[in-house]
Amino acid sequence: MKAISLFLFFFLVVSSAARATEMYCWPVEAGATILSKPDLSAVYPKWAPPSRVGTGTPFRAYRREVHNGISFLFGNIHSSRTSAILDENVVVIESEWTCDYPVSPRQIEGSEALAREALAKRLERHLFDPYSVRAARISEFQISSGPSDSEILSVCVEFNAKNRLGAYTGITMSGYVFRQDGTLFRSVEGWQLDELCRQVQFAPFPELEALGS
C-alpha cells in the first residue's frame, strides 16, 4: 500500500509539472534548431539547413528536460497562419526560444505606462487616420517570462478608426507583446490573437483617443 501511495504521489507531481510547462514559444532569431531528440546532433530532417524556422513560427511546449546542462523543450510546431500542427513531438533548445510562461498577473511599476505610450505612438504611425480613433479600449497587461527569465507584457487593444474612404471600419482588435522596458517585442495576429484576447477585460484607452484632441 505504501509503495502504491508513493507511486500515485510521484505520478501526480510529474503530471502537474508537465501541465504547468505547457506554453507557446517563438524563436528569438530565425534559424532556431529543431531536433528529433534532446541531442544537439539529432537535427530534425525537415528542418536541417538550408531550411529555417521563421521568428513567427509558434511552438507549443508540453515538457522541459535538462541534458548535459542544456534545457530542452518537447512539443509541437504549429502553422503561423492556423492552429494546425506541422510537426509533432519535436525538441528545441529553450535558450533559442521566447516563451509565454503563465504566472499570476501583477503590476510591473513603470513598464505598463511605457508600453501604453509606445503602443499609442505605434498606432499613430500605422493607422491611416489616427486622429479619427474612437471607442479605444485596452486590456490589462498579462505578465509572462520571456528570454533569459526576463518578463514580457502582453496586451490587447480595440478601437474604431476611419479608412481611406473616410468611413469608420468598425471595431478592430490587435495584440502586442512588450519587453519589460516598454519596447515592442512583436505583434500578435491570427489564431494567436484569438487565444490571447479571448477572455480579457477591457478598459478605456484615453492615450489613443487623445491623438485626435
Image (tube, helix red, strand yellow):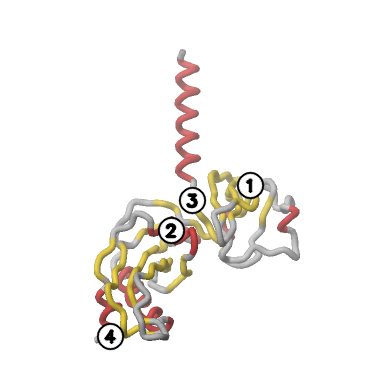
Local secondary structure at mark 4 = helix
Q: Nearer the viewer, mark 4 or mark 3?
A: 4
Alpha carbon distance from label 4 to label 1: 48 Å
Local secondary structure at mark 1 = strand
Q: Amino acid at mark 3?
A: Met
Label ID, residue 194? 2
Please state if 26 lies on the left or on the right of 164 as rendered. Answer: right
- The residue carrying mark 3 is 23
Q: Residue at x 50, y 40 (%)?
A: 18
- The residue carrying mark 1 is 88
Where does residue 131 sit, x and y in percent of width and height?
A: 31, 85
Label ID, residue 212? 4
Q: Around disc 4, counting alpha carbons within 10 Å, would you say few (fewer than 14), some (14 to 19), or many (20 or more)?
A: few
Marks 4 and 2 in Cβ contact (< 8 Å): no
Label ID, residue 115? none
Q: Closer to the N terminus: mark 4 or mark 1? A: 1
